Amino acid sequence: MNLHFMFYVPLFVIKLNNWNIKKVKLNSLYTTNSGLDEYINTDYGNTDYVSTLEEIFSEELDSCTKLLQINRLSVIEGWTEVADNNMYHKIHNHGGLGYSAIVYLDYDSKVHKPTIFISPFNNFLDGTVVEYIPEDIVEGTIIIFPSAIHHYTKPNTSTKPRKIISFNLKAEF
């Protein structure tokens, strides 16, 4: 008898090289006048960041394209997000196609929690929802995942803001 896995969901977790330089560039994108999107401060859907994000993350995006065996991952939009005390991001996804990225910009792993991902199918034995929480997330980590995967964050219970930069990627074949 053989056990086969019919499906898999790729998740890239990358500790960024040259983090101090990248953080300065990313902080220059951060807007303090982000709007409130119900439970989180964000400037979602911003296209002003596209070329800067592609330049900052060219090395990481090139590595992902090789593993995915595609020609290119291009940034189509980006945004900043800050969770002040008690703020969180409710369950959502970024559409049915492509990939999305989360960069942990101001993130204290002692008080902040990483993004939680929800499996596209339930546990086959008991029907429960399956969640995945990446381990060892620290400031200067980027996560790249399929845009269709539902995800969320728990409320920030700290007085330290949790800041991220996020962006959506189009796969080019």
Image (spheres, grey):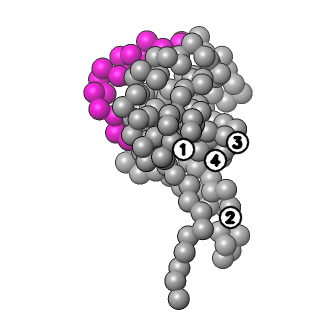
Left or right: residue 133 versus residue 121 is left
Q: Mark 4 points at which residue?
A: 149
Q: Do the CB atoms of the residues marked 2 and 4 lie less than 8 Å apart?
A: no
Q: Residue at x 60, y 68 (%)?
A: 6
| Residues packed near mark 4 inside 10 Å, few (<14), some (14 to 19) or many (20 plus) | some
Q: Do the CB atoms of the residues marked 4 and 1 lie less than 8 Å apart?
A: yes
Secondary structure beneath dot 3 equals loop
Please state the extent of the stretch shown in magenta in the rendering: 14-32
The type of residue carrying mark 3 is: Gly
Q: Mark 2 points at which residue?
A: 122
Q: In front: 75, or 70?
A: 70
User: Can residue 99 be seen from the camera position used here?
Assistant: yes
Q: Is residue 24 magenta?
A: yes
CA distance separating discs 1 and 2: 19 Å
Q: Residue 96 carries which label?
A: 3
Q: Quadrant for the C terminus, please.
A: top right
Q: In front: 12, or 74?
A: 74
Disc nearer the start of the sequence (3/1)? 3
CA distance separating discs 2 and 3: 19 Å
User: Can residue 159 be seen from the camera position used here?
Assistant: no
Disc nearer the start of the sequence (1/2)? 2
| Residues packed near mark 2 inside 10 Å, few (<14), some (14 to 19) or many (20 plus) | few
Q: Residue at x 52, y 83 (%)?
A: 2
